[in-house]
Amino acid sequence: MSASEAEPIEAIAEHLRQASDQPGFYDFSMVGYPLQNTLSAHGHVARGVCQVAADGTLISIQEHTRIQAFSDGIKTWHEASDWTPLAGDRNFADDHAIMGGLARFLSLIHI
């Protein structure tokens, strides 16, 4: 693993070493990657696409099971509408993510 690949994992690890949950507040962390950096030249991929506020706060994560790069941009497949461009800033807002504190997070959501 290169230094640039290890950096986000080290950032998550450091955050989790210092994280402390409080009553009603759970300390999670996430490292996002620009969506175009996570695509495959061999076909479509599945990703959790994040929406974030201007301050970097996570608003939502939406699962897309078919994302692919085309000559006119990054698109996702929707049964009702064929290939649809993904909206947002490809350098930040549409990110693939590694989440820290996942076991605690999964116990709090309803699937």
Image: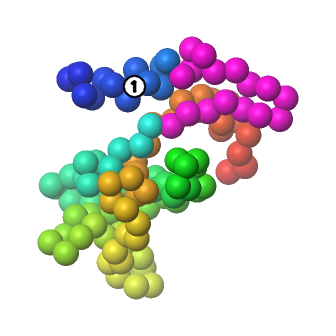
* Residue placed most toward the observer, 78 or 28: 28
Question: Does residue 87 appear anywhere in the picture?
Answer: yes
- The image quadrant of residue 46 is bottom left
Name the main secondary structure of what is drawn in magenta: loop
Q: Secondary structure at mark 1?
A: helix
The residue type indicated by label 1 comes to Ile
107 w.r.t. 69: above or below: above
When the figure is inspected, residue 52 is found, relative to residue 71, above or below; the finding is above
| Vertical relation: 11 (above or below) 91 | above
The reply to whether the magenta stretch includes residue 28 is yes
Q: Which residue is mark 1?
A: 9
| Residue 45 position within the rendered picture, expressed as x and y whole percent measured from the top left | 31, 55
Q: Residue furthest right?
A: 23
Q: Total of numbered circles in the picture? A: 1
Which one is nearer the viewer's eye here, 102 or 94?
94
Question: Residue at the spot x=54%, y=22% of the render?
Answer: 15
The percent coordinates of residue 110 (x first, y second) are: 72, 49
Q: Quadrant of residue 41?
A: bottom left
Image x and y of residue 71, in percent = 15, 72
Instruction: Tell me the quadrant of the picture where the N terminus can be found.
Output: top left
Residue name at image x 60 percent, y 55 percent = 59
Q: Magenta residues?
A: 15-30
Going by the picture, which residue comes out furthest to the front?
Answer: 55
45 sits left or right of 49 in the view: left
Give the percent coordinates (x, y) of residue 75: 31, 70
Choose top left, top right, bottom left or bottom right for residue 102. top right
Residue 55 painted magenta = no
Q: Image point 24% across, 70% down: which residue?
A: 73
